[in-house]
Image (cartoon, rainbow, N blue to C red):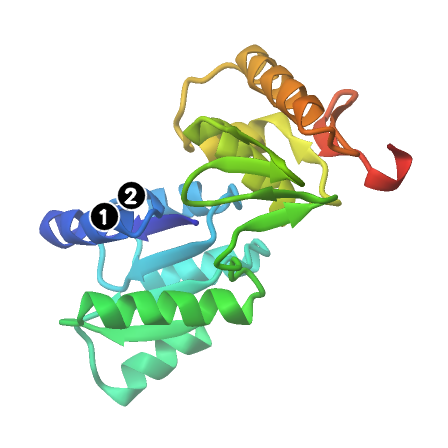
Amino acid sequence: MRVLIVEDSVSLTDALESVLKREKFTVEVAHDGEEGVAYAETGVYDVILMDVMMPVKSGIEATRELRAKKVNTPIIMLTALSEESDKIAGLDCGADDYITKPFSMSELLARIRAVTRRKGDIIPEDGLSYGGVTLNLYTYMLSSGEKQIKLSKKEAEIVRYFFEKPSFVAQRDQLISKVWGFDSEFESNNLEVFISFLRKKLRFLDARFTIVPVRGVGYRLSDPKEG
């Protein structure tokens, strides 16, 4: 799961990042509302943790702008403001949940699970499957029947991206942002190398599908019924 933290407190950001990475989340950070909007509107995140009181642009303003731009990523507001009117303002601007500082990390993790579950993004404990092939999200093992093969972390993230949205055509830039990060300098032609490796591994597994190019756009999974 990819999480965006939009928070101006360096100490809180560091603490959140440490805990979330320990839980196997991929984390990126923005330190003000305007930067947060720029990151979030790429649509590559599974959940956004949004501080309310920030420089340049508040969390309320940032959330309202993202919703106006049709960015539907779940947003959890993080704030020291505890009045009922403050919570109502946060929820009315488009946030999915609201948690008051100080909070425990276990409560935050529970709220992340709750908002992603409402969006239908909870991942089964045994991994993700498509066309008879299963990806273990913890061991990065790709398996089909009696065969299995180990993936690199980036290969596993690419496969996860496709398996989560199997009918989706992934644009090259979106795929790079999702796997390598919003501000990555990873080049598009290097992505083809990773895709080529994954095709070979799918052939090794005798998979009934592969990753096919979509001219001028990116890639998609072929239909297992066609294989």
Extreme residue toward the right, this view: 226
Residue 152 at x, y percent in the picture: 44, 26
Q: Which residue is mark 2?
A: 29
Q: Which mark is residue 17?
A: 1
Looking at the rendered structure, the kind of residue marked 1 is Glu
Q: SS of the residue at dot 2?
A: strand
State left or right for residue 181 relative to residue 132. left
State left or right for residue 15 relative to residue 24. left
Figure quadrant of the C terminus: top right
Q: SS of the residue at dot 1?
A: helix
Residue 21 at x, y percent in the picture: 27, 46
Residue 47 at x, y percent in the picture: 43, 56
State left or right for residue 117 relative to residue 112. right
* Observer-nearest of 140 and 161: 140
Looking at the rendered structure, the kind of residue marked 2 is Val
The residue at 30%/52% (across/down) is 23
- Reply above or below: 84 against 193: below
Which sits earlier in the primary sequence, circle 2 or circle 1?
1
Q: How many numbered discs?
A: 2
Can residue 121 be seen here?
yes
Q: Which mark is residue 137?
A: none
Please tell me how crowded label 1 is: few (under 14), some (14-19), or many (20+) other residues with Cα within 10 Å: many
Q: CA distance from mark 2 to mark 1?
A: 8 Å
